[in-house]
Image (spheres, grey):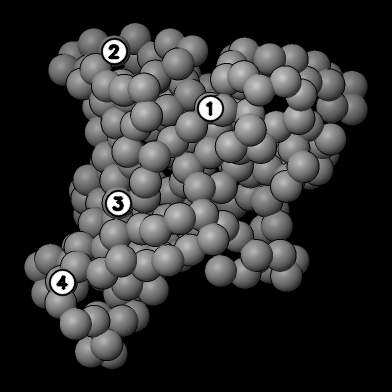
């Protein structure tokens, strides 16, 4: 998987999902279940509904600095300070096979992502650079993110970014008020992802086809269950 700047991505939720659909459409899949090897680990694709729904098992999330990686002594990278340009941010770092930096703020915007995202991506804390998510919890059902993607720039939607933001905010730094069946809607600039916390830091994004495009429906749902070594499963509806 290659980014627009020519760098190689370890893993992409949308990329592997579209690749699985391509294999299905071309008759190259030997069955409804595929295992795809990426530099960020194996992902499993399960195809149902005649190829319209593809379930991506993305593997485990980690906040371990040695795994992400983040410089310094080995630790879980939670609620640490980082200085960029004229601002100091509090952030959490996570990996779902690729690195992420999640920054909770009272207000976020595309301009914020475009201004600070490039500098956070290349900050010295992140030896392999990082994806960046700016997170605002508008209310208990409506957390929102703006995304700066490593090697790609400002991005409207990202499966791994949404997974990392949900893991950090709902499961670790407790920004969500998990009420009403423990659900919240995570909102990138395009689409939304319904997050469900059932107690063990496990995220699943389940299809809710309400926005159509030429390749995929931009809306998916997600289930978040809290656990020490969570497994991320992405469910997406393709059109």
Which of labels 4 and 2 is toward the front?
A: 4
Residue 157 appears anywhere in the view: no
Q: Is residue 77 above or below residue 32?
A: above
Check disc 1 and report the residue beneath it.
63
Check disc 2 and report the residue beneath it.
178
Q: Quadrant of the N terminus?
A: bottom right
Q: Is residue 98 above or below residue 10?
A: above
Question: What percent of the width, then of the height, locates residue 177?
Answer: 34, 9
Between residue 154 and residue 80, name the one nearer to us. Answer: 80
Which of the two discs, 4 and 2, labels the residue nearer the N terminus? 4
Question: What percent of the width, then of the height, locates residue 98?
Answer: 56, 47
Q: CA distance from mark 1 to mark 4?
A: 32 Å
Which of the two discs, 4 and 3, labels the residue nearer the N terminus? 4
Check disc 4 and report the residue beneath it.
32
Q: Quadrant of the C terminus?
A: bottom left
Between residue 16 and residue 65, name the one nearer to us. Answer: 65
Q: Indicate the quadrant where residue 131 lies.
A: top right
Check disc 3 and report the residue beneath it.
57
Q: CA distance from mark 1 to mark 2?
A: 21 Å
């Amino acid at each position: 998987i290659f980014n627009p700047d020519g760098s190689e991505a370890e893993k992409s939720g949308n990329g592997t999902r579209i690749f699985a659909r391509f294999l299905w459409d071309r008759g190259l899949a030997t069955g409804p279940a595929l295992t795809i090897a990426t530099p960020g680990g194996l992902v499993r694709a399960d195809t149902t509904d005649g190829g319209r729904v593809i379930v991506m098992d993305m593997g485990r999330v980690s906040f371990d600095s040695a795994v992400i990686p983040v410089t310094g002594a080995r630790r879980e990278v939670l609620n640490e300070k980082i200085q960029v340009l004229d601002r100091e941010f509090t952030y959490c770092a996570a990996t779902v096979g690729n690195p992420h930096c999640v920054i909770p703020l009272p207000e976020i915007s595309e301009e914020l992502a475009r201004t600070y995202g490039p500098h956070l991506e290349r900050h010295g804390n992140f030896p392999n650079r990082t994806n960046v998510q700016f997170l605002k919890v508008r209310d208990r059902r409506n957390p929102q993110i703006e995304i700066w993607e490593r090697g790609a720039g400002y991005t409207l939607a990202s499966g791994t970014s949404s997974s990392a933001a949900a893991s950090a905010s709902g499961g670790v730094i407790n920004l969500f008020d998990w009420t009403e069946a423990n659900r919240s809607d995570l909102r990138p600039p395009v689409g939304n992802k319904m997050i469900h916390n059932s107690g063990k830091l496990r995220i699943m994004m389940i299809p809710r086809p309400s926005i159509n495009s030429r390749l995929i429906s931009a809306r998916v749902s997600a289930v978040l269950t809290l656990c020490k070594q969570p497994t991320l499963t992405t469910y997406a509806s393709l059109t």
